[in-house]
Amino acid sequence: MHNTSPRNVAIIGAGPAGIYAADLLLAQAPEVQIDLFEKLPAPYGLVRYGVSPDHPRIKKIQETLHEVLDNPRIRLRCNVEVGVDVTIEQLRGAYDAVILSTGADRDADLGIPGEQLQGSFGGADFVAWYDGHPDAPVEWPLQAQSVAVIGAGNVALDVARMLIKHADQLEHTDIPPHVARGLAENPITDLHMFVRRGPADVRFSPMELRELGAQHDVDVIVDPVDMELDDHAQRMVKQFSQRRLLVRTMTEWSEQDQASLTGSRRVHFHFYQQPARVHGDHQVTTLEVERMTPDEHGRVTGSGEFEQYDVGAVYRTIGYRSSPVPGVPFNAATGTIPEKHGRVLDETGDPIAGVYVTGWIRRGAIGLIGSTKSDAAQTVASVLEDLSVTPVQPGDAAQKLCEQLTDSVDWEGWLQIDAAERALGAASGRERTKIVSRTALLSHARAKAHTLDEGENA
């Protein structure tokens, strides 16, 4: 930046994408001050509310994000929702640049009949429940003995693992008490995973797939017929080490001695099966799937052959979608904000001055958490390029706007929430127990004299 005047930048969304963008700005522009806004009372986004409680290694990313936020040039402002507590126009008027990094928070639909029946769920909603999201319901209807999970990515594996896992295996995690109680009462015995393509085309990570097979008292069952690889699958296995590892794991499962399968719970993989209809009067009773036929390139088409599975619940995990940001253009078809090089575009395709986007709401919900770093780099480059030639906003405008947000949670407030969660965890011999209710989170953030009972944490 050629202009060395102080600059104020607002970032909307305190998940990995927003925090990585802040980190890059701090490193490349010493004159920039950042206000980081988050609609929830706590930061970290998908790392806090999208990673399974039995994945502490991934949750450790919070430590890196914590180090970025613990910087005097960043002001954290949680419990602030754009379109409710502040508008985009207000932000544009107070800041030299506004970066949107609000992520993806809802499930993509299957688009099949019966999808809206009771017992048909979005995987993202289930993840929000077991991760203690403050806006998730307290109770989750875990009533089915036989359950279907639809999808071929790591979210599908997470949902399947949390559904099939025995609750006592989660005692050491940060799982909230009401979630532990719900999972302990889960009557599931069989979980069916449906994948529309073949075993060489799944998007699982090899480590997470193996983890599913390592669950206590759980067997994984794969039909040997599905592991007869066609020419396309053999090419994939030969060319890509990840695919090779995945197929090797599933082949091992298909070759198990059936007499050795004594688990009280079972996961059944079904390849080349595409959901066609969910049946039931009001409650899910059956999932109808169509057998798919692969071609020499791995593409699949419907065969016209259908089969039905008796299941009491269906979970769709075929991708996340972003929600629109009030006052910002949004492409409903792609679930993203129109942009070029991170600059938000208006309806005519021209950049909107001072408004930028990064992360999943920019490019769709693809890639792992780390891939948001490279995405943020391009957006930050555009921000710095534009700031070098644009006038400076009044220096006190951002400060005045923040002072008006009297219900916001700042960095010290978050540290108080963090300390309270660690104290709750220590009482149970674990690192932390997640506080769930928005009321309790805000109470701890404001340092009121407060004793959290188990009911309030629900």
Image (cartoon, rainbow, N blue to C red):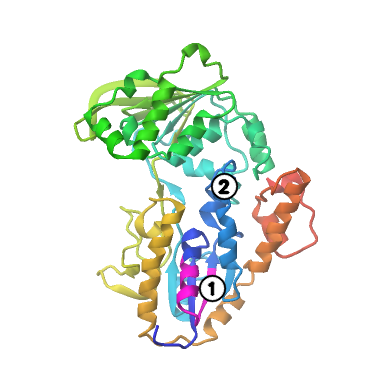
The image shows residue 376 at horizontal and vertical percentages of: 41, 65
Quadrant of the image occupied by residue 179: top right
Quadrant of the image occupied by residue 192: top left
- Highlighted magenta segment, given as a residue range: 21-36
* Mark 2 surroundings: few (<14), some (14-19) or many (≥20) residues within 10 A: few
Q: Name the residue under label 1.
A: 35
* Image-based side of 308 in relation to 164, left or right: left
The image shows residue 420 at horizontal and vertical percentages of: 73, 56
CA separation, marks 2 and 1? 29 Å
Q: Which of marks 2 and 1 is in front?
A: 2
- Point 25% across, 69% down: residue: 349
The answer to whether residue 114 is visible is no
* Image-based side of 1 in relation to 300, left or right: right
Q: Is residue 255 magenta?
A: no
Q: What residue type is labelled 1?
A: Asp
Q: Name the residue under label 2.
A: 57
* Image-based side of 36 in relation to 322, left or right: right
- Tell me the quadrant of the picture where the C terminus can be found: top right
- Point 31% across, 63% down: residue: 338
The image shows residue 436 at horizontal and vertical percentages of: 65, 50
Which of the pair 249/78 is nearer the observer? 249
In the image, farthest residue toward the left:
296
The image shows residue 330 at horizontal and vertical percentages of: 35, 61
Mark nearer the N terminus (2 vs 1)? 1
In the image, farthest residue toward the top:
259
Which of the pair 229/273 is nearer the observer? 229
Q: Which amino acid does label 2 sit on?
A: Arg
* Mark 1 surroundings: few (<14), some (14-19) or many (≥20) residues within 10 A: many
The answer to whether residue 198 is visible is yes
* Residue 63: mark: none
